Image (spheres, rainbow, N blue to C red):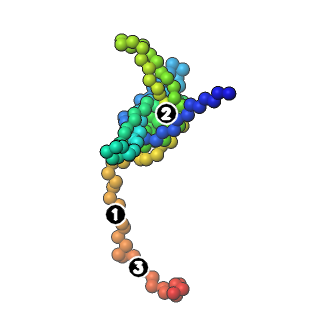
Amino acid sequence: MAININRVILAGNLTRDPDVRYLPSGTPVTSFRLAVNRRFKGKSGDVDETCFIDVKVYGKQAESCGEFLSKGRNVLVEGYLRLEQWDSEGGKRSKHVVVADRVQFLGFVKEKEEEEVVAPDVSDVPVEDDDEDFPF
């Protein structure tokens, strides 16, 4: 009995803003590229490797990705691999794409500088000195 499993789980950062398009049926499709970093020990020390993966999301989740994701955002993607093939001027082309069943938004990108929080002036507020309430 042959067992086939096609499941992918990735966590990484978007390399650009997502691209939302619509199929002729009206179904939304959002595409984005994910950069997944890997560090390992090499012969001459630590080696950093980045893998770039194209991701597609369909349906309602595609609209959410298009609305809330942006370049640099950290996400977790669960889905499966699909081989896409097409003809171009140079001949037949192909690439693997992750079709996401689930996209979980992880980190937040800071959009603007945080506003300075100023504590209210409490110097004029009367303070009650009631030591009887404290057990020590």
Instruction: Say which label, 2 or 3, has the lower sequence index.
Output: 2
The residue closer to the viewer here, 96 or 101, is 96
Residue 126: which disc? 3
> Residue 64 at what x, y percent from top left?
49, 36
Q: Secondary structure at mark 3?
A: loop
> Residue 115 at what x, y percent from top left?
33, 55
Between circles 3 and 1, the one closer to the viewer is: 1
> Residue 97 at what x, y percent from top left?
47, 28
Q: Secondary structure at mark 1?
A: loop
Residue 118: which disc? 1
Q: Give amino acid for label 3.
A: Pro
Q: Are marks 3 and 1 in contact (CB under 8 Å)?
A: no
Between circles 2 and 1, the one closer to the viewer is: 2
Q: Give amino acid for label 2.
A: Glu
Q: Give amino acid for label 1.
A: Val
User: Which class describes the residues within 10 Å of circle 2: few (<14), some (14-19), or many (20+)?
Assistant: some
Q: Which residue is mark 2?
A: 63
Q: Determine whether, in the image, residue 35 is placed left or right of residue 57.
A: left
> Residue, x 49% and y 30% (percent of image)?
98
Q: Secondary structure at mark 2?
A: helix
User: Would residue 69 be visible to someone looking at this image?
Assistant: yes
> Residue, x 35% and y 61% (percent of image)?
117
Between circles 2 and 3, the one closer to the viewer is: 2
